Amino acid sequence: MTMAESLIDSPQIVSRLLSTKSTEAITAVLSDLQIVDENVYTWSDLNPTSGWQPGKLHWIPVGRDRGNAGRIQLAGDPYNPASERLINGMEAIIELARRLELLKNPEAPMPMSPREAVERYFDLPRLDLVWRTSSKDARRLLEERMRDVRRKLLLRLEFDKKAREFSVEIRDHGIGQTPERVHETLLSLGRTDKAEKPYLIGIFGQGGSSTYAASKYSVIMSRRAPECLDEKRDGIGWTIVRKVIPKGRRDPYYAYLAAHPDGRVPAAELTAIGRAQFEAGVMFRHIGYDFGRQGSAVARTLFYALNHVLFNPVLPYDLYALKDKPDPMNGTGFRLARRTAQLEASGTRLLDKSFQPQAVGDSM
C-alpha cells in the first residue's frame, strides 16, 4: 500500500482536513492523494464501474447527476445558502434528540412541528417569546438553556490574509451520518425522507448545496452519534467537493471525491485521537467563499443577513465572524422582542404618533 492510499483511511487525513482553510492548503492535500483525473474516469449512472481504478479516489457528480450545475447555482446571493446549512444543522440536532427519545420509549409520539420538538426536547419556547416572560428568574433560566443549545451549532467565518480569501464553516453536533450513507444524504440532491417527519424543517432535499457554487472547494466530514450507529462501524466519512470543467464539453458540474463506484465517500478509521478531534455531527467547510464585492464589511453583513433570513429560528446558534468570541444568534425576532421589552420597562412610548380610534362600518 502506498502512502497516498494509506492516507485515505488514516487518522492523519482527519487532522489535515480540520486544519485546511485555504485553497493552497486544500490543493496540497489533493496532491498527496491518489486521484483519478476526471477526464480519465467519467462517472456514468448506467455503468459506474467502467474505468474505475481500485484503491484510488474518483470524482463523482454531487447527487450522482452530471447535470447538477443548474440546480446548485440557483442561489442569487452567497448568504442564503449558508443559512440553509444552519437549518440542516438544526434538523440534525432535533433528529438526534428524537432518536434518543425513541431508544428510551419506542412508542413515544412524533412531534408534529419543529417548534413542538424544540419545546419537548430542549424546553425552549419560540425564541421571540423569551423576552415576554414576565418572571426574570424564568427568563434567566431560558437564556442559560439557549446558551447550552447554541454550543451545538456554529458558523465560523475566517479570512486568510495571504490568499486573501474567506472560508465559511458550519458545524453541528447533531445525529451525523455514517460514512456508508454520506453520499445518499449529505451529498444528495432532491432526495429526502423529511416529508414523513413533520418535526423537521426542510422538505425538498436541496438544502445548502448552492454553497458549493460560492466556494472553490468544500470539505465535508461526518461522524454518526455513537448511540445511533444502527450496527454500523464508528468512523469519519470525508470528502472534498469542487467544480469540474470537462475537456471538450460545455456542461460543468460539481463533483466530490468517492472511494467506491456506488458513490460511497472515503472513511477514516476512528482512533482515540480521532474521537477527540471530531465529535459526532457534521462539518461543512467552504473554502474560497465568494461574498462578492463586500470587502471588510463581510462580517457585519453576514451577522445582519443571517439574523434577517433566520428571523425567528427554531434553535439558536453561535456566529464566529472573524473573531474568537461568538455572537449569539437568536434571530431578528428575538432582538426586536428584547428591544421592545427594554423600551416598555423604561416607560418609552413605542409609537412616535398616536392615532384616534376610527369607526368601522359600511360607508356606502
Image: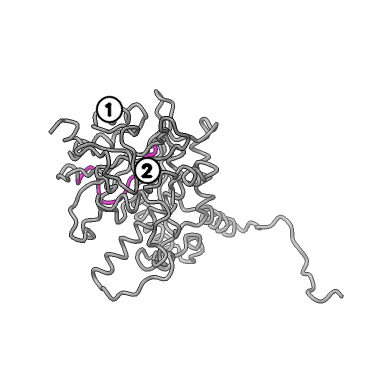
Identify whether 152 is placed above or below 9.
below
Return the x and y of residue 279 as percentages of the image width and height: 25, 48
- Badge 2 amino acid: Pro
Return the x and y of residue 191 as percentages of the image width and height: 39, 56
Residue plotted at (40% across, 53% down): 88
Label for residue 359? none
Image quarter of residue 91:
bottom left
State the residue position of label 2: 61
Identify whether 235 is placed above or below 40.
below
Label tally: 2
Given residues 182 and 67, the one toward you in this image is 67
Mark 1 residue element:
helix
Drawn side of residue 167 relative to residue 222, left or right? right
Drawn side of residue 38 relative to residue 359, left or right? left
Q: Are marks 2 and 1 in contact (CB under 8 Å)?
A: no
Report whether residue 158 is seen: no
Report whether residue 350 is seen: yes
Residue plotted at (34% across, 48% down): 45
Identify whether 201 is placed above or below 60.
below
- Badge 1 amino acid: Ser
Return the x and y of residue 185 as percentages of the image width and height: 34, 53
The magenta span reads: 275-286
Given residues 256 and 125, the one toward you in this image is 256
Membership of 297 in magenta stretch: no
Which of the colour schemes (rainbow, by chain, secondary structure, one colour) is used?
A: one colour
For discs 2 and 1, the disc positioned in front in the rendered view:
2
Label for residue 31? 1
Q: Quadrant of the N terminus?
A: top left
Given residues 343 and 11, the one toward you in this image is 11
Which residue in the rendered view is the most extreme toward the top?
A: 162
Membership of 283 in magenta stretch: yes
Drawn side of residue 1 relative to residue 192, left or right? left
